[in-house]
Every structure is written in C-alpha cells, then in structure tokens.
Amino acid sequence: MEHQTQHWVKVAELSEVPEGKSKAVQMEEGRSIALFNVDGRIYATDNQCPHMGYPLTRGTVRNGILTCDWHRRSFDLEGGGCFHVECDDLRTFPVDVRGSEIWIEPGDLTYRRGEEHKQLLREGLLSEDRWTMSKAISLLLKGGVPEEEVMGTILEHVSRHIASSHGAEGGSDVSRLINGLRVGRRYTDADRLIAVTTSACSAAGPASERLEVVPLPEPVTWEKISQWVRNFSYEGQSGRIERCLFTAYHKGDAEKLRPLLFECAVEPHFIDLSHIPLYVSYLSEVIDEFGWERASELVFYLGAQLIGHRPEEPERYRRDAIQLMRQILPTLESADLEQTDEFDEDAFVEALTSVNLQRSFEAVQTVLTDGIKLERLITTLVLLAADRMAHTPVNVDAGWENLTTELNLAASLRSAQQVGGNKVAAKGIFHVAWQIFADRWINIPSRPLSQSLSKEKLDVANEAEGIKHIVDAIETLNVQEVGTRVLGYLNAGYCPERLIEQIGHTALWDDTGNQVLPTLRTVFEEWKRAEGHPAQPQLLVGLARYVTDIRSNTDNKSAATTAMRFAEGRTTIEVFEE
C-alpha cells in the first residue's frame, strides 16, 4: 500500500498484475488482499480462503469462479459467494483503476459475523474437529465477542452432549470447561486460545435433544424437595433428583440448590468417590460464570447424576471408612468450628499419612473439634498433596491421577465452604483424608511439612536462563532433575509467578494440556494462599514433575496458532513460512 485518500487505498500498479495473473498485497495488521486480472478487469478479494486460510492467489479462475487450490472450495469472484455450504463466503472489495494505479475500498471492517461463527463453533463441537473449533473461537475473540459469550456457546453444547452420552463422568468435561476458562484468563494470544480451545475439544461430541423435564405438580414445598433429594441421593435415584432440582428452580429456590448439592456430595456413602464433591464444586463455578439461565440444564442433569450416583458394594476399608465417619459426625454437631489457626500441623500430617484409617479419621475429628480454622486446614491438605507430588517415586507408576485428585479435591473445599458452609467443608476433609489413605499403594515416604527443603540455588546467570533450564528439563522429559531445578530457581529469589506461567505455557502446548488444566489452575490460585509456609515451593515442584512425567512431546499448537493467524487475516502459507 503506497497511500490512501478518503476510504480508497492505492494497493498496486496496474503493470504488477498482468492479464491472467494474480498478486497478493499486504495491508495493515498483516491482512493479505488478492488482486486478479481477468480479461483485463481487476478484482479484489481477501487472499485467505475462508475454509482453512490457503492463499487464493495460488488458486484458479475460470468462468468467473475462483477455486482454492488446497481443498477446492469455489467462490463467485465478483460477489464472493461460496458454492459449498460448509464454507463462509469470501469478502470482496470495490476496485477503481486510476490510470496506471489500482485502488480498492476496504470498507467498514467492523465485525458483524458473530452469529455465523457461533454456528461454526457448534458445527465443530458436533464434528469434534479441532481446526473448526479453533477457527471459530479465534474469529469470535478477534471480532471482540466476549470470552464469556464464546464459552457460553460451548456450555450450551456441553449441556446436551453430557446428557446425550454421559452420566456422572460428564463432570470431567465440566472440569476442563471451567478450568480452561479460568486458566485462559491468565494468558494472552495463542496461549489463551489453546486453553479455551482445549476446553471446547473436551466437550465436543454428539448432542441430542432430550425429553422435556417439567415441574412436579403442586403442592410442593422446598422442605419436601430437599428431603426427597437427600433420600434419592442415598438410594442412587438420579432421574428422580433431576425433576426435584428442576421443580425447585422454577419455584424460585435456585439459590438453595447449590448448598444442597454440596451437602449430598460429602455424605459418608460417597467416601470413595472423590470425583463427586470435586465435580459438584466445578458445577457450582459454572453457575458463577454463566448464571442460572444458561447453566440450569447442565446443573439439573449432571448434578442429579453426581449426587444420584449409586456406589458399588463397599469393600472392607471403604466400609470401615463409612462407619467411622458416621460415628464421628455427631460429635461435630456441637463443635465450635473456626476458632484458631494454631495446631500441630506435623502431627496431623503424620496421622493422615500413617496408613491407619482410624488414626487418620480421628486426627480429622480432633482438629475440627479443637476449632482449627477450615481455611488453615485446607491449606495444609493442599500443601500435603503438593508435597506428595514432589516426592512420589517416578520410576514405575507415579500415581499422578490420584495425587492430582488429592490436590484438586482439597482446593475444592474452599468452594464447598463458601457455598455449602462450614459443616459441609468439614465433612469434605474426611473425603480428602480417605483419598490419601486410598493412595497408600503409591508408597510415598512421609515427612513433616515444616521440615526445611534444600537451600541450594540454581547456577544460572539470570531468571530467564533459569526458566529456560527448567523448560528444557520438561521438554526432554527429565523428571529426575526438573524438581531440583525448580527448587533451585525459587531459592535464587526468581519470580515464582513467571515460572508458573511458563510451566503452564509448556503444558498447554502439548497434547496432555487438557489433563493439566485443573492442577495448573489449582497451583495458580493456591500459591499466594500458601505464602510463608515452608512447603509452599512444593506446589511448583510437584506441578513441574507432573507436567514433565505425563508429557507426550507432541505439539497441539498447530490448529490453535494457525487459527489465530487466520483470524488476523493471514494466509496459511504465511503462517507456515514464519
């Protein structure tokens, strides 16, 4: 582009586009425009094919039809209409040849295709096509559509998808949805897009229509509904629970539903089903993010599936845990919770890791009846899980799924306390204690959380070099060294937040990124809460070891980054040539 007058822009000399030839012209912000000379007439279009971004200057023109040379999508050269239903129309521009100069009118570039691209996103979700989802999300975000609105479109699909093909296990989709959203907000550009797209991919699949749920006939009171839900939860009657939840919502009792879900999720009979309270926590966050109107269908169905899940016949230790918890709970009814921060943390940790179920549960009973503040106890449980991640043997089976469950379940108790109250969070602590006991097979040596960690510093010139040293260990799958490097980085006084971001960046750009999202989010949020605690560094050490050991070393960046460049108006070839 040489210069412009009013709304017209000079883009080339006429001699630069001989008859029968084409030329690509770079506009502002990297946008590529294609010029075509057909029978002496100049045409101007976007140079990127709306299908997958291939440069149209490499295509062919015949009888006024422009055909992309990659996937053979065809367009009306003058009007831009696409002859294939699965492709957007091509943008064209008015042309004015002024003597020996070619001028075009770019026109109003205001984004007005939000609804079209939401539909494209829905099609990608149904077809499970990562490129289509990435492309749609990129275009929507680039067009200024709020991220919450984009995620709301994904949520609408998730609700039907889970109801079409999942039971309680649909909570894993919700986990990636909400954690992808929360993690994505901490990043920009491609990292942000990858986090959001990972959320979308995890929720992709069939989404069938369901039979309409209708409220129970009157007279129905909240007292009746809440009692029915508790009974049906104990009996494993999920279908009956859904109609109860639906009825309560339409009677105006929506705000009472989340506490009720949490209350049911931490009952003793769910003691060996740690995903129940964890997924209820994530489901609660979906309501915070999107509101009841958008989230209600998902909450009614998945909430009912979770708390209406019928556990298998308990084996010996689980049966003992249920009985112990039921015996202890009455002693908590009169306990004065939330009185003090001071307690023997190391003794509590030793009891939890003693591989003695009764001792573990009695230790929980003691700290609760002593009035230790729940926030303090939750922090201890989070750091204990992180410390176990930092010390788990990795030569055979590190037990990452179990250990990250310990970590994320412990962190989710903050939501349980906020929404369900102190008694609900107190019950949740028994569930974390059981999870630690159930993970005894991992055989992690127990140690006091107050015990000092190594003070050795990483021998690097600066912070950037230190991060590179750690990322190199992650990318080469050097799990034996990465923890030591992270601790040395922190001992050197370098920025922990920047390191968390870089570890997250490395994880997101790998195909295992969807597994990492919940744990990455937990470490982001728990780091400040653990400030001043001797075991705080273990959050980062554990995360780094986890990310390194499960890494597949296969990039998933191609679809997301190419889609981001697509939204900027750049062609596929330009992206690949960078």
Image (cartoon, grey):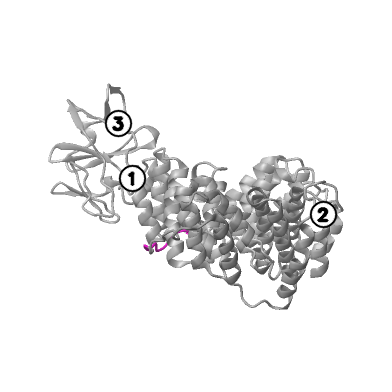
**Which is the main secondary structure of the residues drawn in magenta?**
loop
Q: Are marks 3 and 2 in contact (CB under 8 Å)?
A: no
Q: Is residue 250 left or right of residue 445?
A: left
Q: Specify the amino acid type for callout 2.
A: Leu
Quarter residue 257 falls in: bottom right
- SS at badge 1: helix
Q: List x then y, in percent, for residue 221.
A: 53, 56
Q: Give the range drawn in magenta.
A: 202-209
Mark 3 → mark 1, Cα distance in angstroms: 18 Å
Mark 1 → mark 2, Cα distance in angstroms: 53 Å
Does label 3 or label 1 sit earlier along the sequence?
A: 3
Identify the residue position indicated by label 2 in the image: 449
Q: Is residue 557 left or right of residue 73?
A: right
- SS at badge 3: loop
Identify the residue position indicated by label 3 in the image: 108
Position of residue 527 relative to residue 319, above or below, is above
Q: Can residue 507 be seen in this view?
A: no
| CA neighbours of label 3 inside 10 A, class few (<14), some (14 to 19), many (20+) | few
Q: Specify the amino acid type for callout 3.
A: Asp
Q: List x then y, in percent, for residue 102.
A: 22, 30
Dot in front, 3 or 1: 1
Q: Nearer the viewer, residue 45 or 183?
A: 183
Q: Which residue lies furthest to the top in this view?
A: 5
Residue at image position (19%, 27%) is 100
Q: List x then y, in percent, for residue 382.
A: 72, 54
Q: Specify the amino acid type for callout 1.
A: Glu
The image quadrant where one finds the N terminus is: top left
In magenta stretch: residue 207 = yes
Q: Which mark is residue 115?
A: 1
Dot in front, 3 or 2: 2
The image quadrant where one finds the C terminus is: top left
Position of residue 303 relative to residue 192, above or below, is below
